[in-house]
Amino acid sequence: MFAATQSMSSLRAAPARARTVKPRATTAQAAAVQAQKIRIRLRSFETNHMQSACDKIIEAAKATEARISGPVPLPTKRRIFCVLRSPHVNKDSREHFETRTHHRLIDVHQPTAQTIDALMALELPSGVDVEIKL
């Protein structure tokens, strides 16, 4: 019993290790780190409109010497609608329509103020939905 209490007291008496405390980043610094990437998500029903929009965005960003990753093709979403062909009888006769929504993702790394101005001034096709996150 004496040995057990002696070892317990030696554990308690061990010197505490000195910890190094890292200074925390301020909110302004954290925002600056997060603002170093712009994520652009494109959606469209037409692939040719999507491709021309991607080309214009990449061209504008490269002109301001920003790094680009993408366009990354994301999975295409298909919505299928089943419609009766006849308003009265012939329920077994149906017609299927589908819409395909194509998605692309472009990341602009280390953008400058000129990059943001160039992206805001772009004229993109009307059939393309653009979503920008900083």
Image (cartoon, helix red, strand yellow):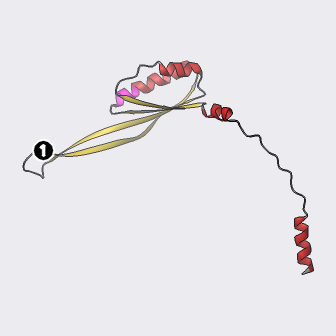
Task: From the top left corner, tell me how far across and down residue 87 is, in percent.
Answer: 9, 45
10 lies above or below 106: below
For the N terminus, the image quarter is bottom right
Q: Main secondary structure of the magenta part?
A: helix
Residue 22 lies left or right of residue 124; in this view the side is right
Q: Is residue 64 visible?
A: no
Residue at image coords 64%, 33%: 33
Secondary structure type for disc 1 = loop
Q: Name the residue under label 1.
A: 85
88 lies above or below 115: below
Residue at image coords 37%, 23%: 125
In the image, the segment drawn in magenta is 44-51
Q: Which of 66 and 37 is in front in this view?
A: 37
Q: Is residue 28 visible?
A: yes
Q: How crowded is mark 1: few (under 14 residues within 10 Å), some or many (20 or more)?
A: some
Q: Residue furthest bottom?
A: 1
66 lies above or below 102: above
Q: Give the amino acid at mark 1.
A: Arg
Task: From the top left corner, tell me how far across and down residue 20 is, in percent.
Answer: 82, 46
Task: From the top left corner, tell me how far across and down residue 108 is, in percent.
Answer: 55, 29
Residue 134, quarter of the rendered image = top right
